[in-house]
Each structure stands twice: as C-alpha cells, then as structure tokens.
Image: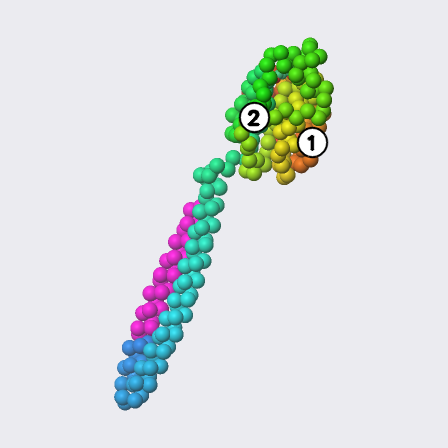
Amino acid sequence: MQNKKMINLKLVLMSVLVCSAMFMSSCGNSNQNSVAVNSNTETAAKVNETTVVETVVEATKKQEEATTKTIEQTTEQVKETAAENVNEEGEMPTNEVLVAYFSATGTTKRVAEKIAELTGADLYEIVPANPYSSADLNWHDNNSRSTKEMDDPNVRPEIGSSDISLDQYNTIYLGYPIWWGDAPRIMATFVEKYNFDGKKVIPFCTSGGSGIGRSGSNLGNLAGSGSFANGERLNSSADTNNIQSFINNNK
Ligand SMILES: Cc1cc2nc3c(=O)[nH]c(=O)nc-3n(C[C@H](O)[C@H](O)[C@H](O)COP(=O)(O)O)c2cc1C
C-alpha cells in the first residue's frame, strides 16, 4: 500500500513536469508562429507581438498558479503518506496495550510480565509511595496496615510511581492480588486518578484461592469511565498456555 502511494506520488510529480514542459514548448511555438505569420507589416507585427506577449504572460501566470497548487497538493499528500507510514511501521511509539499492576509480594508481577510478553504490551507497576512491610501484610493481625485499609473503603494509599499517560492505550490489563476478597485500596487510587474513556479494561488477579469476584466491576464503578470486563483470577502457577487462554478469552 505504501509502495503504491509512493508510485502514485511519483506519477503526479512526473505529470506536473511533463505538462510544464509541454506547455512551455507550446508557448514557444505559438510565439514563433505568430511572429512569422504577422511579419508582413510592421504595425501588424507590433500589434500581434503585443498580443502574443500578453497571452504568454497571462498563460504563464495561470500555469504558475496551477503548478503552485499542484505542488501544495503533492506536499500535502506526501505529509499524509508519511504520517500513515509512521503508524503502519511503528516508527513512533504507538503501542496500544498496557499492563498496569500492583503486586505486594511478586506473584501478580510475574503474571503481569507474562501477559505483557505475550501481548507485546507496555508495563506499568503501581508502586505504593509507602511500601508494604511483611507486618503490614499480616492478615492474621486485625491491626495490620492492610487489614485496616481493607476495613475502610475510603482509604486511598498514595501511588509512588511516576504518572503515566494512558492516551495511546485502548486496552489495559489491570492486575492485583486479592485482599480480603477485593482489590487492594491502592487499585482504587489508580482507577480514580485516570480517565478510561473509550478504553477496554481487563482486570486480572492472583490469590490464595479466592476468585476475582466483583473486584473488577467494583473498580469499574470507582473509575466511572471505560469499559471494565469482569476479568479473571490467574493461578500463581499459571503457565504460558493458561495466560494465553486468558488473553484469548478476553479479546
Ligand atoms: C492482606 C492480604 C489479604 C489476602 N486476602 C486473600 C483473600 O481474601 N483470598 C485469597 O485467596 N488470598 C488472599 N491473600 C493472598 C494473596 O491474594 C495472594 O498471595 C496473591 O497471589 C499475592 O499477590 P502478590 O504477590 O502479587 O502480592 C491475601 C494476602 C494478603 C497480603
């Protein structure tokens, strides 16, 4: 398609050059012929010469205008073709898939990396500004940080990783571990921070056994934009085949 466009452009340019050459040559001939035909009397020759000069000047002006217009149109076509080529050939970073994830102990991270590898997606890790210690993650302790956060649906732990622009992405895999049957509160921070308008969001989780439940749709409600799928739980030992099936199921 690109070659075809380039050939078309070359043809346009060649046509312009050929037309210009023909025109100039015809002007030259008409000039010579007119002078020859009207060489009998001086007055007639002068009148005719003036007419010829005026005609040539007028025609040259028109030809110049037409040539300028053609050059402008050709330049525009070249620009459009160049822009299309950039998209088709991926010369500019135009990845449309992102895997954004939070992982406290590395299980979700491993799955996220595999999804990115299989889909060619970019990766974005949601890193807490205040990292979770082992004590923070102790679900046997009613006073641990994670237990208290999950007890309060309004908690929004701060994200420490740099902001990301979601503009170029139209599909976003969103990964997290299940905490107390739900997504960790930092996932709420993430979905409330960004605009998912026009984007397809595919949640996935890892867990000790619980399913993804309503955690994905809960995040969709908090986001208030985008199309959130129900998503799937992936086993901590999910292999390439399992992860590929998940990707296929959610296309
Ligand atoms: C605070 C906390 C709460 C958890 N709650 C659940 C749970 O309700 N159901 C479950 O199956 N696993 C639960 N888990 C286990 C994690 O979901 C599981 O280990 C997950 O794969 C960890 O992912 P990560 O390594 O990416 O952080 C919990 C773990 C933590 C730290």
The residue where tag 2 is placed is: 160
Place of residue 178 in the rendered image (x, y in percent of width and height, measured from the top left): 66, 19
Report the side of 112 relative to 58 (left or right).
Answer: right
The residue where tag 1 is placed is: 222
**Label 2, label 1: how far apart the Cα atoms are:** 20 Å
Place of residue 250 in the rendered image (x, y in percent of width and height, measured from the top left): 63, 29
Q: Which residue does the image show at 37% across and 58% down from the upper left?
A: 14
Query: Which residue lies most toward the top here?
Result: 140
Place of residue 205 in the rendered image (x, y in percent of width and height, measured from the top left): 63, 21
Q: Which residue does the image show at 66% across and 17% down from the upper left?
A: 146
Q: Quadrant of residue 191?
A: top right
Say which of marks 2 and 1 sits in front: 2
Q: Report if residue 19 lies within the magenta region.
A: yes
Q: Which residues are magenta?
A: 1-29
Q: Which residue does the image show at 47% across and 46% down from the upper left?
A: 83
Q: Label 1 sits on what residue type?
A: Leu
Q: Earlier in the sequence, mark 2 or mark 1?
A: 2
Q: Is residue 123 above or below residue 209?
A: below
Instruction: Tell me if I can see residue 46 in this picture.
Output: yes
